[in-house]
Every structure is written in structure tokens, then in C-alpha cells.
Image (tube, helix red, strand yellow):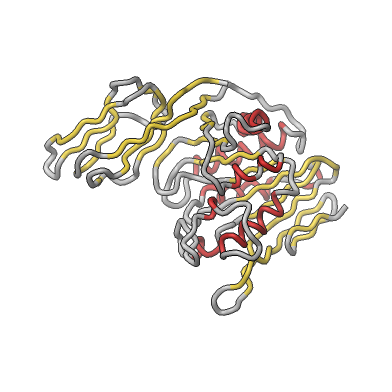
Amino acid sequence: MTTTFGSASAAPGEFDTGRLDVGETRDGTTIGLPVAVLNGAEDGKTLYVQAVSDGDELNGLGVVNQFVPQVDPQELAGTVLVTGIVNYHAFQVAEHRNPIDDTKMNRAYPGDPNGTSSERIAAATFDAAERADLIVDLHQGSTSRMINEVRVRCGPHHRIHRECLELAKAFGVGHVLDQKGPDGQLARAAPDEGIPTIDPELGGAVGWDDESIRLGVEGMFRVLRYYDFLPGDVDTDLQTRASGFDQYGSPTGGLVTFQQELGASVSRGDTLFEVTDTFGTLKSRITADNDGVFWRRRRLPQVATGEYVCSVGTDIDEF
């Protein structure tokens, strides 16, 4: 049976690309998000994938760019629907938020077809997501440096929490943040419709990080094999899970020197970072409040008083 998504249309065993109309620009030009359909030769589940919900998070686009050409629809069982760039306006100007309405796209789901620019884009992509059995919403840590992780955002008491965790484990980058997310996230809204959803945060870089993209491509193929879109076995190794975050700001202005590497285990009392003045004189030394994993850190060293510096994942276990 032929599958359509926006203007893309693919018969069984075929691939097609097209555009999903979501409104108009200020000069009246139609806005079309780039979309693709991989329609397998055999019946199976449907997977929805999207990237660039935040306009400056490009690692997910790198995954789409490298993952899609490697999938042969003739070997596929089921269907993969892809939105390559969600936040059209922000992507054009390399900004995080949609500049038309100053909105973070991943706070607008499930959207409103008659609402703001972001709400309309969210509604159109959510309609596609609701067609799926599984959803992967590709993100990254914006301009912060962070470990490669997968986020489960439905909350531990959600009725399909276990299924979301299973999808995270199948993606398999090694670290999972299992913590209820803010309202308006796709990974919050879609599980309410009964669809297991994950939010891979593929590292953090300004631009394009090859290693994070490589891991994301591997994760996508792991998902395809685990859920029988493609043949092959998947080893579901133990993942390190954090259920909380301790975030640290700087008590003073100056230059930050980190004493921990990303992904390192830290114990309560371990030094996380030091702050010096312009001439190297120590001003502050910040230690960990709890045991955990050094999860995320700012990219540039200069900080003002109270400015964000780093995060430690806490309440750690393996599953």
C-alpha cells in the first residue's frame, strides 16, 4: 500500500522525499518542511523520526543525512517517516528558538493547527507522529558539551514508561536520563497517546559533531533491528540511568577550569571545577553535592556570578 507524508509518496519497497506544508513566510512563500518516506517491501511497524526541533541542534540532522541513504526499502519491513528539519525558521538563522514567535519548539506539542507558527508546525508533525508505533525525536545539548544520552520524558509512573525505557535501551548509547520532562515536549505528549517515544540528546557541539552523529546512526539501526524493521540481532547491554540532575552555577565571575571529564563517575565532595581571575588566582572551588555522573558542562570558560557551569546526573543505577 502506498504511504504518503506531505508531498512524499512511496509504494511498498520505495523511497520518496517531499515537503510538509506548515504555513507561509512573511512574503507569502509556502513553508515546507523536508520529509521522507521509507516504505518497506514487507508489512510491519511504523517509526517516526524527526530532527532540528531546536534550530541550532544539527547532530540530529547529521543522523538523518547519513542514516536515510543506508536504509534499503526493499529490505525493510514496515515504514519509516522522517521530518529532517522541524524548526524551519530557527534553522534558517541558526538560532535555538523559532524567531517568528520566540518559542522553543519542543515546548509546543501537541500543537494547534490554528495557533502560532510553532504551534502549527508542532501540530503538523504531531499528526505524523501519531501514525507511528515508535517515535525517535533527535536532539543535542545545543551549545553545551554533554555526554551522548537518551532521555525518557514521560515520567516513571506513566502507563507506557517501561516501553519508553525499552526503546531507549534499544537505541543504546549507554546513558539514559529517566526524568519527567516539561509540558509541551514531544516525548511527553506522544506517550499520552500510547506511543513509546525517546529523546536522544546526541552530545553537544556548535555545529556538527562526527562522533555523536556516528552513535546516532548506530542507534537508529539498532532500533530498526530490535523492532524487526530490518533483520539482525541487537545486544541490549546495561545502560547507566540517572533519574535526577544537580546543576551548578558559579559563585563568582572569572574563568572556569573543569576537574572532571564528561561521563566520569564523581563522589560527593569531589572537585567539579575551579574559578580563577584573569591572572590565574583561585577564587572558588566547587565540589559535588552528591554521587553521580559528570553529565554536562558549559562550552566557554568565562562565567559571571550565578551563571550555569555544569550538571551531574544523580540517582544512578543500571538497567
Closer to the camera in the image, 122 or 39: 122
Task: Tell me the quadrant of the picture where the C terminus can be found.
Answer: top right
Q: Is residue 84 left or right of residue 4?
A: left
User: In front here: 90 or 185?
Assistant: 185
Where residue 76 sits, quadrant-wise, is top right
Q: For residue 87, what is the image quadrant?
A: bottom right
In the image: residue 266, left or right of residue 39: left
Residue 244 quadrant: top left
Residue at 71 percent across and 31 percent down: it is 226
**Percent coordinates x, y for residue 106 in the rendering:** 54, 51
Q: Where does residue 54 sit, x and y in percent of width and height?
A: 51, 53
Q: Where is residue 4 drawn, in percent x and y?
A: 79, 58
Q: Determine the residue positioned at 40% across, 41% down.
A: 145
Residue extending furthest toward the right: 1
The reply, left or right, for residue 125 in relation to residue 105 is right
State the residue in front, 69 or 174.
174
Horizontally, is 234 left or right of 215 in the view?
Answer: right
Q: Residue furthest bottom?
A: 27
Task: Give the residue displayed 28% in from the left and 34% down from the top.
Answer: 258
Question: At 63% from the left edge and 59% from the top edge, which residue is drawn?
Answer: 112
Image height of 97 relative to 41, above or below: below
- Number of numbered callouts drawn: 0
Q: What percent of the width, then of the height, locates residue 307?
A: 28, 45
